[in-house]
């Protein structure tokens, strides 16, 4: 299966739950879920009726899906040698 949209992003603003729907013969590869300023304490990730993940997103013990603004670790490891 060919990759149609590499590095595609889905942004949802507000309280509406995000929803993705693949057409027949298509699939999604979700690499990350990032949440900023959550109102709820947990999220449930489902595919159709099956629960595939339950994540803490707020509380005294931190978030598993924290949106770290400007904290990309890879940006500090770029090296240019010999030139």
Image (cartoon, helix red, strand yellow):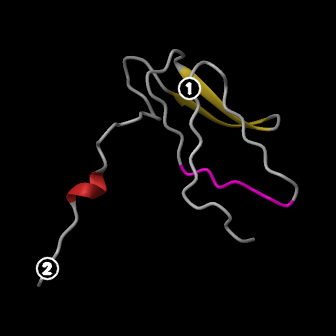
**Label placed on residue 13:** 1
Q: Which residues are magenta?
A: 25-31
Quadrant for the N terminus in the image:
bottom right
18 or 32, which lies in front?
A: 18
Q: Which residue is mark 2?
A: 81
Residue in view at x 17 percent, y 74 percent: 80
Mark 2: few/some/many CA within 10 Å (<14, 14-19, 20+): few
Q: Residue furthest left?
A: 82
The image shows residue 18 at horizontal and vertical percentages of 66, 31
Q: Answer whether labels 2 and 1 touch (C-beta < 8 Å).
A: no
Instruction: Label the magenta part by its dominant secondary structure.
Output: loop
Residue in view at x 44 percent, y 27 percent: 36
Q: Looking at the image, is 57 positioned above or below residue 21?
A: above
Q: Please tell me whether residue 47 belongs to the stretch shown in magenta.
A: no
14 or 72, which lies in front?
A: 14
Name the front one of labels 2 and 1. Answer: 1
Q: SS class of the residue under badge 2?
A: loop
Q: Looking at the image, is 25 positioned above or below residue 32?
A: below
Q: Is residue 69 left or right of residue 77?
A: right
Residue in view at x 18 percent, y 70 percent: 79
The image shows residue 44 at horizontal and vertical percentages of 65, 29
The image shows residue 70 at horizontal and vertical percentages of 29, 41
Residue 43 found in image quarter: top right
Residue 2 found in image quarter: bottom right
51 or 81, which lies in front?
A: 81
Q: Please tell me whether residue 29 belongs to the stretch shown in magenta.
A: yes
Q: SS class of the residue under badge 1?
A: loop
């Amino acid at each position: 299966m060919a990759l149609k949209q590499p590095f595609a992003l889905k942004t949802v603003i507000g309280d509406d739950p995000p929803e993705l729907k693949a057409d027949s013969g298509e699939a999604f590869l979700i690499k990350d879920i990032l949440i900023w300023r959550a109102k709820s304490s947990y999220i449930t990730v489902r595919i159709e009726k099956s629960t595939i993940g339950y994540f803490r997103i707020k509380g005294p013990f931190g978030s598993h899906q924290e949106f770290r603004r400007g904290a990309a670790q890879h940006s500090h490891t770029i090296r240019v040698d010999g030139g």
